[in-house]
Image (tube, grey):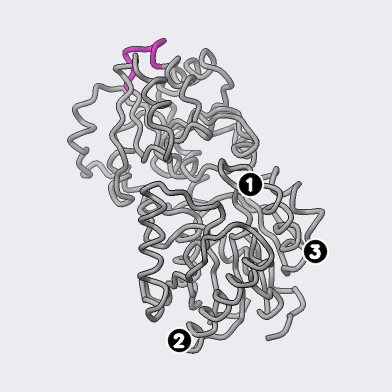
């Protein structure tokens, strides 16, 4: 696809969220490839609650809804459209759609952007925007959002079906999502997640200092990095592994999900060798990975996780770590570099095997991680759209 596209990217994660997802990384890669990106903060997919997290986000959104688009990186501007947190209904969608279309039109006018490409992660996009107003359109489906707690599953599935029918192409990250979207879309392809290789390869630098809070934890250290949420993470399996091997240190880095602290504390209460360090900045993660012996993905197997491709998988590989995970369908094609174990006994056995150095396996991990960069995947997604007939603007 020709360079210099103006891309409107509808995210399901706010730009300045401390834990980056596919959306921010893809926006950066598109800008690095020479395109201009208008990054649209999450419009909100689940009904807001009265919790402190949602109250803070609503107040921040009110403050950011009206100023000009704010530049955050060369070639990237962010806007935070106001969406009214009202009960679902057709008139609410029409009102929020009008606000969104007006906000986008003003932003394009201010920045001199064209409507070349709509790149969306939001399955409800077609209920809010005229997809065909853009010359090209892409739905990047990276999660089964309808299966997350608190979501209006039937409405999201219905809107996603409409979106798949309308866009020029759909790119999915897992076979489960591919099976779901392919019958609905004109064109659909599968491209797994990617990784910021250069960032995580810093873990291989002998001069990189080990964080003090990690260095005081006894080795070997088994590391999990990510959201600590009970609907995604098998706490019981992790606790069972910890009890089987009190000589291993299991280190958890990440924020505890809202509503999960009590469950987490109960599940891990009698495991002194499980260390919860809390969230750490993205820039600090390579130093923590350097101090680990194994990367863990103890996912709970359910409708959501069967459809996900954990970003941490390639991040672990890029840092040189062996990986032990529960049997997620998305990881099955990578059996040469990941041990998949369904229960505590097999999981512990896989970790014990991973702790034995294997130079050939380590080289294969680094080779594979180096082949799945964000820039390369973004090029492939743009090429996927290249031959598609254009719409109109």
Rendered residue at 44%/60% (across/down): 14
Measure the alpha-carbon separation of dots 1 and 2: 33 Å
Mark 1 Cα shell of 10 Å, populated few (<14), some (14-19), many (≥20): many
In the picture, the quarter occupied by the C terminus is bottom right
Residue at which label 2 appears = 111
**Residue 19 placed where, x, y %?**
39, 51
Rendered residue at 52%/12% (across/down): 345
Q: Nearer the viewer, mark 2 or mark 3?
A: 2
Q: Residue 28 appears in which quarter of the rendering?
A: bottom left
Of label 2 and label 3, which has the lower sequence position? 2
Residue at which label 3 appears = 186
Q: SS class of the residue under badge 1?
A: loop
Question: What is the span of residues highlighted in magenta in the rendered image?
Answer: 242-249
Q: SS class of the residue under badge 3?
A: loop
Indicate whether residue 157 is drawn in magenta. no
Of label 1 and label 2, which has the lower sequence position? 2
Q: Are marks 1 and 3 in contact (CB under 8 Å)?
A: no
Rendered residue at 40%/78% (across/down): 66
Q: Which mark is residue 118?
A: none
Indicate whether residue 245 is drawn in magenta. yes
**Residue 100 placed where, x, y %?**
55, 74
Measure the alpha-carbon separation of dots 1 and 3: 20 Å
Residue at which label 1 appears = 144
Q: Are marks 2 and 3 in contact (CB under 8 Å)?
A: no
**Residue 255 in the image: above or below residue 46:** above
Q: Nearer the viewer, mark 1 or mark 3?
A: 1
In the picture, the quarter occupied by the N terminus is bottom right
**Residue 313 placed where, x, y %?**
49, 40
**Residue 363 in the image: above or below residue 344:** below
Of label 1 and label 3, which has the lower sequence position? 1
Mark 2 Cα shell of 10 Å, populated few (<14), some (14-19), many (≥20): few
Mark 3 Cα shell of 10 Å, populated few (<14), some (14-19), many (≥20): some
């Amino acid at each position: 696809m020709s360079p210099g596209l103006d891309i409107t990217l509808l995210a399901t994660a706010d730009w300045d969220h401390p834990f980056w997802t596919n959306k921010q990384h893809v926006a950066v890669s598109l800008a690095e490839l020479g395109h201009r990106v208008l990054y649209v903060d999450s419009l909100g997919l689940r009904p807001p609650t009265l919790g402190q997290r949602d109250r803070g986000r609503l107040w921040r959104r009110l403050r950011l809804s009206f100023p000009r688009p704010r530049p955050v990186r060369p070639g990237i501007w962010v806007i935070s459209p106001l969406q009214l947190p009202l009960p679902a209904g057709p008139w609410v969608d029409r009102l929020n759609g009008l606000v969104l279309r007006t906000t986008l039109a003003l932003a394009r006018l201010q920045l001199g952007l064209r409507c070349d490409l709509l790149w969306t992660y939001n399955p409800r996009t077609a209920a809010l925007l005229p997809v065909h107003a853009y010359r090209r359109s892409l739905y990047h489906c990276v999660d089964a959002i309808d299966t997350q707690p608190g979501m209006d599953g039937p409405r999201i599935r219905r809107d996603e079906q409409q979106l798949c029918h309308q866009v020029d192409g759909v790119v999915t990250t897992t076979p489960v999502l591919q099976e779901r979207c392919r019958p609905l879309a004109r064109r659909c392809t599968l491209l797994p997640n990617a990784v910021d290789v250069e960032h995580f390869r810093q873990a291989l630098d002998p001069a990189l200092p080990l964080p003090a809070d990690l260095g005081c934890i006894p080795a070997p250290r088994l590391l999990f990095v990510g959201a600590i949420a009970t609907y995604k993470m098998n706490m019981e399996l992790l606790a069972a592994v910890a009890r089987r091997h009190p000589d291993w240190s299991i280190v958890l880095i990440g924020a505890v999900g809202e509503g999960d602290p009590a469950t987490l504390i109960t599940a891990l209460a009698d495991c002194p060798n499980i260390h919860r360090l809390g969230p750490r900045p993205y820039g600090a993660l390579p130093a923590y990975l350097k101090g680990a012996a194994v990367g863990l993905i103890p996912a709970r197997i359910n409708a959501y996780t069967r459809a996900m491709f954990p970003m941490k998988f390639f991040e672990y590989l890029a840092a040189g770590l062996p990986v032990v995970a529960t049997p997620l369908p998305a990881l099955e094609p990578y059996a040469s570099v990941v041990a998949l174990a369904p229960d505590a006994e097999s999981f512990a056995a896989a970790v014990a095997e991973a702790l034995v150095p294997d130079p050939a396996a380590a080289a294969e991990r680094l080779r594979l991680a180096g082949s799945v960069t964000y820039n390369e995947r973004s090029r492939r997604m743009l090429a996927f759209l290249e031959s598609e007939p254009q719409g109109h603007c």
